[in-house]
Amino acid sequence: MSTHFYGEGNIGSAPEYREFTHGNDEPRRLLRLNVYFDNPIPVKDGYEDRGGFWAPVELWHRDAEHWQTLYQKGMRVLVEGRTVRDEWEDAEENERVTFKIEARRVGILPYRIERVTLVPREPDSEPPADE
């Protein structure tokens, strides 16, 4: 069971990077984020959070290792993906069920960002010039 998800929240802990071997192919790379998706409601003196929740966010991508240093605790992000039911056993072998988000995109929102630095594109990845 899964459903489309689109939410804004804050990263609650340092990102976790993992790499999984995949036969002789390039390894699969995973970046896990723990995100608090809040529900800010305007009140007289600002905003009040009503009904937020924590969710694990999984981002599978070849650049996940690099992104581990880009995403930081406290950063505001916009997550697009799908919610997925995740079944597992805890240390006492009790069956547990939770939901996680398999992200297609995790965008950094400009709150509390001081500086952005772009890296030049590699020559072979440049789009063809219009003639």
Image: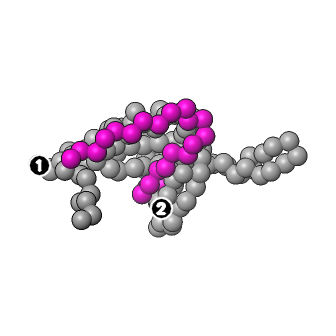
Q: Does 107 appear in magenta?
A: yes
In the visual, does 81 lie left or right of 17? right
Please tell me whether residue 24 is drawn above or below residue 69 in the rendered image. below
Label 2 residue SS: strand
In the displayed orientation, state which residue is furthest to the left: 24
**Amino acid of disc 2:** Arg
**Residue 131 sits in quarter:** bottom left
- Counting from the top left corner in percent of width and height, residue 11 is at 54, 39
Going from N to C along the chain, the mark reached first, 1 or 2, is 1
- Residue pointed to by mark 1: 24
Please tell me whether residue 19 is drawn above or below residue 78 in the rendered image. above
Please tell me whether residue 95 is drawn above or below residue 91 in the rendered image. below
Magenta region, mostly helix, strand or loop?
loop
- Residue pointed to by mark 2: 82
In the visual, does 74 lie left or right of 93? right
- Counting from the top left corner in percent of width and height, residue 64 is at 34, 43
Q: Which residues are magenta?
A: 101-123
Label 1 residue SS: loop
Identity of the residue drawn at 47% across and 61% down: 82
Nearer to the camera, 1 or 54: 54
**Amino acid of disc 1:** Asn
